[in-house]
Image: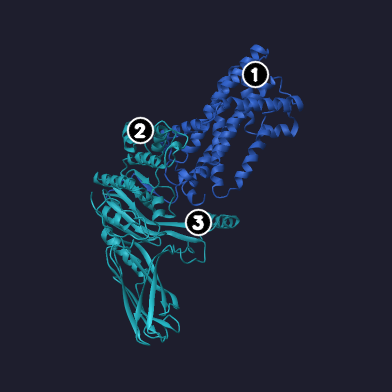
């Protein structure tokens, strides 16, 4: 049985600031609607693309979204930042309304967009349980019947009559989540904001999601944590620039997402002739290749370099910095090549398995002469992503740290 | 396939599609909001709810010295303390309802952006929590009145019109709520109006017979102030207690029509705005 049916859903946003300029647009729009004409700004609305700035001030945050969810299904919605996931959630939870199209719903929706909404710092834990519960749509008697359970779940019995402003942030979140967890909606929407809590909290959230789905309720899980989606969801939707680019099983959707991502990445650059190759009068780059092109953190990663040595120095020192998306150097490595003159030199660097954290990386290359004089310093056009792998414990968030080496542990 | 959806989310709702049933369903929330407003305001104050008494008393004393002693504006043979206190008590209720509901969207953007509940719950709860405040302040008014009768030999004349007191309060609530939610809807996108509002309410106070009786005015001014829909409420309130002033049903009838029209219009506008205000607030 279908519990959610989204049909031809569109959402338009206006960019820029609201000022005297927007009043003219409003009046123009109003004048068109009064005469029964189409919204004049609908036609000029651009695609949702954050990288390029369009010529106009309107974008479609969502465009022609169609899908349906059956009862008891756990649906993962994935996509890059700005793909429209949050907008879709906002419309589903009735925080804002669509520009065109409709959503039909069967059952009570509760969204864990943010726990603790409406908590008042001056009120006690007890008072806030009632207030927050009512905001989330529970009646007073419903809350009263679950009150003891909520308090027990939160583990803050001792402080229940203390104003929540005196709570530690951990207690605050636990109490807030306890209320949300006892909502018992027919449809639960979980946003990835939940995934940033500590491990224990995350375990509780995801455990709750599992419980909910096992009871035959429907769950929508929005995330760009592929591992969590893969292990928790059966169905998946991939969103890209405001529209749906793939619907299928969670597994397939994640694969599509990774493929789409890989297209943005560049794990292979090659130049046939010296004349068009990047470099200078000393060094020209011939080829760089990352193998495998979609490595997992558990894979050994080989980076193959070949370059032309145009100097009369037979020994070239090649080094690279591995740089992550925050422009942070993860590590550097180098090797001295003994080469023939004017020859193509080849070399491969092997990054051991279970060292890199998941993420997207690029390379900065340095070429030095044998007396360590810098010959060439050049960013490569290589971008490769190291993907996370399923884990056999319940924490799915990103592991902290620039690197993520697998270390030896001894028991006892 | 059978189509029995419990809810359909659409871009626009028709003008009169107001879900009163839903608001009723959320009545517990409204009462919890009332409780929150009431409890949280006086937390961490030494005098606590005593401030409910201190505010009107101090304003009354100020008015007494400025307008009665210095400006020598008559109070229609009503004891000046009681005259001002009655005016302030009633006026405060109206202005609180109006000004506090007028920034519903802006002030609650944080909550509204995260979770859905009928947005009207917020302004309704404000009107109710102020009603409690008004009740307490009317008790203060009665207490001061008894004091004046016993110790200062003040004559009053409570008459049968006292029974329309609840109706007068209802009119104030309706008008304040109506005007407030109209302004709240209009200020979501363009904040200009909220600047206007602060001094507009102040101005309105002087256009209402609070520090002077209606009988004090004459000519054009008199007809202008009589047109103020708040005037009949003020005058009737004082008439009910002191038997002095003007009381006419036609004025109250006009005020009632005005109040309920404003509320009706307000609910319609509010209802239209609440769906997508998050994009513009």
* Tally of numbered discs: 3
Chain A colour?
A: cyan
Residue B265 vs residue A301: left or right?
Answer: right
- Tell me the crowding category of disc 2: few under 14, some 14 to 19, or many 20 or more residues within 10 angstroms, Cα based: some
Dot 3 lies on which element? loop
Colour approach in the figure: by chain
Q: Nearer the viewer, mark 1 or mark 3?
A: 1
Instruction: Give me the chain letter of mark 1.
Output: B
Dot 2 lies on which element? helix
Which quadrant of the structure image shows residue A333? Answer: bottom left
Q: Nearer the viewer, residue A296 or A144?
A: A296
- Tell me the crowding category of disc 3: few under 14, some 14 to 19, or many 20 or more residues within 10 angstroms, Cα based: few
Instruction: Give me the chain letter of mark 3.
Output: A
Residue B217 vs residue B235: left or right?
Answer: right
Q: Position of residue A146 (x, y in %)?
A: 32, 33
Q: Is residue A70 above or below residue A313?
A: above
Dot 1 lies on which element? helix
The residue at the point 25 percent across, 45 percent down is A216
What residue would you read off at disc 3? A36
**Are the two marked residues, 1 and 2, in contact with CB atoms closer than 8 angstroms?**
no
Residue B250 can be seen, yes or no: no
Q: Nearer the viewer, residue B203 or A119?
A: A119
Tag of residue A157: 2
Chain B colour?
A: blue
Q: Position of residue B166 (x, y in %)?
A: 54, 24
């Amino acid at each position: 049985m279908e519990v959610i049916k989204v049909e031809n859903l569109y959402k338009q946003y206006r960019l820029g600031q609201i000022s005297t300029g927007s009043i003219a647009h409003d009046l123009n729009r109003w004048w068109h609607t009064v005469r029964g004409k189409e919204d004049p700004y609908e036609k000029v609305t651009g695609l949702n693309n954050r990288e390029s700035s369009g010529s106009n001030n309107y974008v479609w945050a969502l465009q022609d979204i169609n899908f349906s969810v059956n009862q008891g299904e756990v649906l993962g919605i994935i996509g890059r930042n700005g793909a429209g996931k949050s907008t879709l959630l906002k419309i589903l939870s009735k925080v804002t309304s669509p520009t065109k199209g409709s959503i039909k719903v069967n059952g009570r929706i509760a969204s864990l967009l943010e726990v603790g909404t409406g908590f008042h710092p001056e009120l006690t834990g007890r008072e806030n349980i009632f207030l927050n519960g009512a905001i989330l749509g529970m009646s007073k008697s419903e809350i009263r019947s679950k009150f003891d359970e909520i308090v027990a779940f939160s583990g803050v019995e001792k402080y229940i009559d203390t104003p929540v402003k005196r709570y530690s942030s951990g207690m605050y979140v636990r109490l807030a989540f306890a209320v949300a967890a006892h909502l018992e909606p027919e449809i639960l929407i979980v946003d990835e904001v939940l995934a940033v809590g500590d491990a224990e909290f995350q375990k509780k959230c995801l455990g709750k999601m599992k419980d909910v789905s096992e009871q035959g309720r429907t769950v929508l899980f929005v995330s760009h944590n592929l591992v969590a989606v893969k292990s928790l969801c059966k169905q998946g939707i991939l969103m890209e620039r405001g529209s749906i680019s793939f619907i299928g099983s969670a597994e397939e959707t994640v694969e599509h997402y990774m493929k789409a991502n890989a297209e943005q990445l560049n794990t292979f650059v090659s130049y046939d002739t010296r004349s068009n190759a990047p470099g200078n009068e000393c060094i020209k780059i011939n080829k760089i290749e990352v193998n495998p092109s979609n490595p997992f953190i558990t894979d050994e990663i080989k980076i193959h370099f070949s370059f032309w040595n145009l100097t009369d120095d037979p020994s070239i020192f090649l080094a690279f910095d591995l740089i992550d998306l925050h422009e942070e150097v993860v590590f550097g490595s180098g090797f001295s090549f003994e080469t023939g003159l004017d020859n193509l030199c080849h070399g491969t660097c092997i990054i051991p398995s279970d060292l890199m954290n998941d993420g997207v990386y690029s390379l900065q290359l340095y070429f030095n002469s044998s007396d360590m004089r810098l010959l060439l310093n050049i960013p490569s056009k290589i971008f490769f992503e190291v993907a996370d792998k399923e884990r056999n414990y319940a924490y799915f968030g990103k592991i902290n740290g620039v690197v993520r080496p697998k270390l030896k542990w001894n028991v006892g | 396939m059978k189509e029995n959806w419990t809810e359909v989310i659409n871009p626009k709702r028709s003008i009169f599609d107001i879900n009163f049933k839903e608001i009723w369903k959320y009545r517990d929330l409204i009462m919890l909001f009332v409780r929150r407003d009431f409890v949280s305001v006086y937390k961490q104050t030494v005098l606590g709810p005593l401030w409910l008494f201190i505010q009107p008393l101090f304003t009354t004393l100020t008015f007494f010295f400025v307008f009665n002693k210095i400006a020598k504006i008559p109070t229609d043979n009503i004891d000046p303390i009681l005259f001002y206190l009655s005016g302030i008590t009633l006026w405060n209720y109206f202005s609180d309802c109006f000004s506090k509901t007028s920034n519903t969207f802006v002030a609650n953007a944080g909550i509204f952006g995260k979770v859905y509940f009928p947005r009207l719950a917020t302004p309704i709860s404000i009107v109710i929590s102020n009603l409690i405040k008004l009740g307490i302040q009317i008790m203060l008014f009665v207490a001061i009145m008894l004091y004046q009768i016993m110790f200062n030999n003040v004559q009053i004349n409570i008459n049968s019109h006292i029974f329309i007191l609840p109706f007068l309060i209802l009119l104030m609530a309706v008008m304040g709520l109506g005007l407030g939610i109209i302004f709240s809807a209009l200020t979501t996108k363009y904040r200009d109006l909220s600047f206007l509002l602060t001094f507009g309410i102040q101005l309105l106070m002087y256009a209402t017979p609070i520090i002077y009786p209606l009988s004090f005015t004459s000519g054009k001014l008199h007809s202008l102030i009589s047109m103020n829909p708040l005037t009949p409420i003020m005058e009737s309130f004082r008439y009910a207690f002191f038997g002095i002033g003007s009381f006419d049903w036609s004025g109250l009838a006009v005020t009632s029509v005005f109040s309920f029209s404003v509320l009706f219009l307000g609910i319609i506008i509010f209802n239209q705005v609440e769906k997508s205000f998050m994009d513009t607030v």
